[in-house]
Amino acid sequence: MPAITYPATTGPIPGYLATPEGPGPWPAVVVIQDVRGLTADIRRSVDRFANAGYLALAPDLYGGHSPKVVCVAKTIRSHFTGKGPAYDDIEAARTYLLKDPRCTGKVGIAGFCMGGGFALVVASRGGFSAAASMYGLAPEDIATLEQSCPVVASYGTKDLIAKPGTAQQIRTTLSRAGVAHDIKEYNVGHSFMNDFGLPRPLKPLERLARMEFSEPEAEDSWRRVFTFFDQHLT
């Protein structure tokens, strides 16, 4: 069943686990949600990793603690501060995948928006073999990326959330440290790989916020992620 719970230091954490077809074993990926939570859109992304041959788990960072309003606030704050229970939940997800006999022993991390920021932070802490950040904010201390695992990242030049120059700043830091990377910018806004599923009358709001799904750029970014992960996780 895709819906699971896995053990963490604070108790069971709900999550969504997608398994590739075939006998395995497979490399694994922890997929981190955007600020909206473990939505249908994020679950589709987890399925896409599984369809590409990765044992994929998305922890519900908002569902493992109570009260939920406090949990949401703490998770968002952790995104900016680099510390908090969300990081324990992410590490517990990595441990859970490593203990699965169907895992090859290599685990990557991927995240969207807020999740991309989490991915960049934990990429420097050891344990992950590759990281994918989709329009994630750079760590507050970007120099930590000099200790990072290989990174593939995608940004939009019209993004109103990620600071201008984020992609180049990350690229420069990784290049200086000799860390393998693939950083690319597209002529789109934020969240261009995420389909929020808004009703047609609300679609103009996405365009105004420059957070509109764009299939050509999304597909190219997915292609790059899988090419990069195939190189560093298999």
Image (cartoon, grey):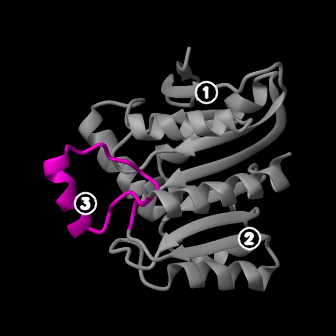
- Give the Cα distance between marks 3 and 1: 29 Å
The percent coordinates of residue 87 (x first, y second) are: 54, 47
Which is in the foreground here, disc 3 or disc 1?
A: 3
Q: Image check: 94 left or right of 24?
A: left
For residue 87, above or below residue 144: above
**Residue 11 appears in the picture as rendered:** no
Label 3: which secondary element: helix
Would you name the residue on which mark 2 appears?
181
- Check disc 2 and give the amino acid type: His
For residue 89, above or below residue 6: below
The percent coordinates of residue 134 (x first, y second) are: 53, 60
Label 2: which secondary element: strand
Quarter assignment of residue 205: bottom left
**First in residue order: circle 3 vs circle 1:** 1
- The segment highlighted magenta reads 190-214
Would you name the residue on which mark 1 appears?
18
Residue displayed at 65% across by 49% down: 109
Q: Image check: 160 left or right of 108?
A: left
Q: Which quadrant of the figure contains the N terminus?
A: top right
Would you name the residue on which mark 3 appears?
206
For residue 80, above or below residue 185: above
